[in-house]
């Protein structure tokens, strides 16, 4: 599997979340995703970027445009150094929220992507990795 | 901070969202609209989202909040022009926009608001 392009962007403000959405859209078009698949990945990215901002106190996203044989894909890894997630199973459930939101962020992002992985250590932070393939 | 403009036409408030909103801008729109409904006594709020390429849980919640707040103040909110890819994504995300009335285009949305202003609430249907 080859990495065609990669980039890291900070997530420190609402404007940064908008910028992440824009870049993920551009890369999704470049990867040849259908309009629905573009929209799903951009929406998942928006949820996770907001999580990093609201729950993690800010963080960053590493973005990779991938080539695997005939497939093209995009992998995104959101990282923050916030309080972490004490109960991952509960955090994945719809409606569970500690941030005053709808609690759809993690579960929603999982449903909108094909690969989903969370690593969280209480007191040290959270990493969420997602990917979608054409 | 930038604001999304709110136009008044008759007894209806019109909003066309043409930029990718960050969360603060979406929150400001919710506050501004609630204020304007209260001041103007508008019977309807029409929100055109045909330019929006993404509606995530935050913007979805904003739309639901506007609908709930305006209902309390006897105004009907209609969201028009949702793109098909956005609708598919919203449902998969788990957001059915409960209580938000939707219409395919501005004309149908205005008809729903006119029905409400005329005291006839039988047409149209809530999204959730």
Image (cartoon, coloured by chain):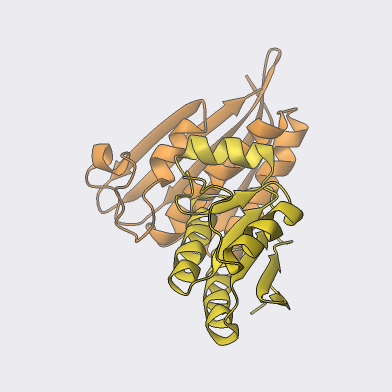
Q: Residue at x 73, y 29 (%)?
A: A31
Q: How many marks?
A: 0
Q: Quadrant of residue A55?
A: bottom left
Q: Quadrant of residue A76?
A: top right
Query: In the rendered view of the protein, which quadrant contains the C terminus of chain A?
Result: top right
* Front in this rendered view, residue A29 or A58: A29
Q: Residue furthest bottom?
A: B39
Query: In the rendered view of the protein, which quadrant contains the N terminus of chain A?
Result: top right
Q: Residue at x 70, y 60 (%)?
A: B110
Position of residue A81 measured from the top left corner of the image (x, y, whole percent): 38, 55
* Front in this rendered view, residue A89 or A82: A89
- Chain represented in orange: A
Position of residue A18 measured from the top left corner of the image (x, y, whole percent): 63, 57
Q: Residue furthest top?
A: A69
- Chain represented in yellow: B
Left or right: B127 in relation to A24 = left
Left or right: B71 in relation to B51 = left
Q: Residue at x 22, y 47 (%)?
A: A86
Left or right: A5 in relation to A89 = right
| Vertical placement of residue A60 versus B85, above or below | below
| Vertical placement of residue B72 versus B99, above or below | below
Q: Residue at x 71, y 38 (%)?
A: A27
* Front in this rendered view, residue A54 or A65: A54
* Front in this rendered view, residue A84 or A32: A32
Position of residue A72 measured from the top left corner of the image (x, y, whole percent): 68, 23
The reply to whether residue A113 is in sight is yes
Position of residue A96 measured from the top left corner of the image (x, y, whole percent): 29, 48
The reply to whether residue B51 is in sight is no
| Vertical placement of residue A14 versus B88, above or below | below
């Amino acid at each position: 599997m080859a990495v065609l392009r990669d980039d890291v962007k900070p997530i420190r403000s609402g404007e940064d979340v908008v910028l992440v959405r824009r870049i993920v859209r551009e890369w999704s078009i470049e990867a040849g995703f259908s309009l629905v698949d573009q929209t799903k990945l951009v929406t998942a990215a928006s949820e996770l970027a907001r999580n990093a901002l609201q729950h993690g106190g800010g963080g960053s996203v590493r973005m990779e445009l991938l080539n695997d044989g005939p497939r093209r894909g995009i992998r995104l890894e959101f990282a923050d150094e916030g309080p972490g997630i004490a109960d991952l199973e509960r955090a994945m459930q719809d409606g569970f929220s500690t941030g005053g939101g709808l609690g759809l962020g993690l579960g929603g992002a999982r449903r909108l992507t094909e690969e989903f992985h969370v690593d969280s250590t209480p007191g040290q932070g959270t990493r969420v990795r997602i990917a979608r393939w054409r | 901070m930038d604001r999304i403009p709110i136009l008044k036409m008759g007894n209806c408030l019109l909003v066309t969202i043409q930029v990718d909103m960050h969360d603060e801008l979406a929150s400001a729109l919710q506050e501004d609209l609630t204020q304007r409904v209260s001041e103007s006594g508008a019977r309807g709020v029409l929100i055109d989202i045909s330019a929006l390429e993404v509606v995530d849980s935050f913007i979805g919640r904003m739309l639901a909040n506007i609908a709930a707040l305006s209902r309390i103040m006897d105004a009907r909110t209609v969201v028009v022009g949702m793109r098909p890819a956005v609708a598919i994504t919203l449902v998969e995300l788990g957001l059915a926009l409960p209580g938000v009335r939707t219409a395919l285009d501005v004309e149908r949305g205005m008809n729903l608001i006119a029905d409400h202003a005329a005291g006839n609430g039988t047409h149209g249907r809530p999204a959730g």
